Image (cartoon, rainbow, N blue to C red):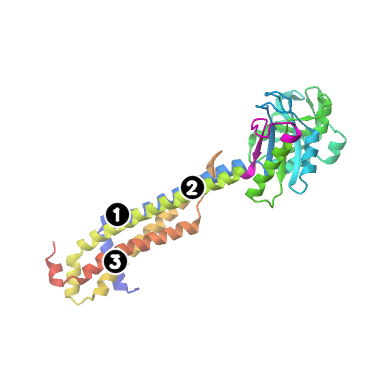
Amino acid sequence: MFNRDLWSEIWHSIKNNKLRTFLTGFSVAWGIFILVLLLASVKGLENGVTRQLNDDASNAIFIYPNETSKPYGGFEAGRRIVFKNEDIEFIKNSFPGYYEYISPRFRRSVNAKYKKETGSYTVVAVKPSYRIVERTVINMGRYLNDNDIENKAKVAVIGRKVVEELFKKEDPIGKYVTFNSFVFKVIGVFSDEGNEREESNIYAPITTMQLLYGNTDEINDIAMTYNPDFNLAKAISFSDNIESNLKRKLSIDPDDQSAFFMNNSAEAFSDISNFTNVLRVMSIFIGFMILIAGIVGIGNILVFIIKERTKEIGVRKALGARPFEVVKLVLLESVFITSLSGLGGLIFAMGLVGLISPLVDAPAFSNPSVDTITVVTATVILIISGVLAGLIPALQAARVKPIVALRAD
């Protein structure tokens, strides 16, 4: 294996046959290069779609009221459904142990002003538990707490973009901002890694906003998380039970599908899981076809190489070379070329992916990457399979009689 004369012959053969050496190496390197880019693209797409879903808690449920489409219980169709504070308590009392966190949401558009800076934003009035549902990250100060809710405090947690537009480089914590005609104290700054649009919002205590806007008990929608121990079936069953119970409480036809809408993250994550599984299967299939194409290409080139060296093989056998030595010479040369080319293609492709990965950050495509073990395994398979593809013609050449080989054109 490590005979110096043997490797000298291999190196001499490579130098004298630059074209076939290049064709063999390029076939291997190109196959690995395409495979790496394919797998990285699939991973980038998977990361992008998953990141979009990760804007909220993975076990979140959102309930949005709408209008009825069917008459029921003495009410005509087209009745606008309005949620109230009591509906939150109704869910809590009806499903103890089934939910994790729950918060009403009460929205109002406001014109915010700080010194000479102004801007239009949405104030989302919530309870402290909403931070978990929305996966809000506090960068400065603090979030809303129970005392703020109890005391109906005029405090606000503002998004990162609100800070940039109103406060510029000034520290906003402790400053007072006017929302329409109401003055609120800024107690915190938040960011939302999954959805930059949320960073233009402002959070305030729901009790405060309901008091300021007509002392109402109405809410716009409900945000909650279900028990994290639930599987997909239990999570969907839970949201179905909430729907049926709310319809019964609000006198809505059980078959009315437009009275309010429920967005269960379990279904969305199930869909994305199925989608990414399909992508993985497709990538494996396409990667397998790329490997097959590479193997066929290497095999064809090796057949050509062996045919080209038929006379040389005849001379070697005439001088006493054993069939095993002929086969070993051909295969070692092939292993050397394919291994070096495969490694080169792998390093180049991985380097390219590593270079462009930090630069790619689109909403549906993010951080393309590839599993090193998978690619290295595929490279080894391609090299071994390609060499094995040339084993049969090498054995056939080794069995050719010297006189026949010497007469070959």
Can residue 186 be seen here? The reply is: no
- Whole-number angstrom distance, CA of label 2 to CA of label 3: 35 Å
Location of residue 82 in the rendering, given as x and y in whole percent from the top left corner: 74, 28
Mark 1 lies on a secondary structure that is helix
Residue drawn 74% across the image and 41% down it: 131
Q: Which mark is residue 23?
A: 1
State which tag comes first along the sequence, 1 or 2: 1
Q: Which residues are magenta?
A: 247-266
- Asked whether residue 221 is drawn in magenta, I would say no
Residue drawn 26% across the image and 55% down it: 19
Q: Furthest residue to the right?
A: 151
Which picture quadrant has residue 25?
bottom left
Q: Which mark is residue 391?
A: 3
Location of residue 5 in the rendering, given as x and y in whole percent from the top left corner: 29, 73
Location of residue 232 in the rendering, given as x and y in whole percent from the top left corner: 63, 49
Residue type, mark 3 in image: Leu
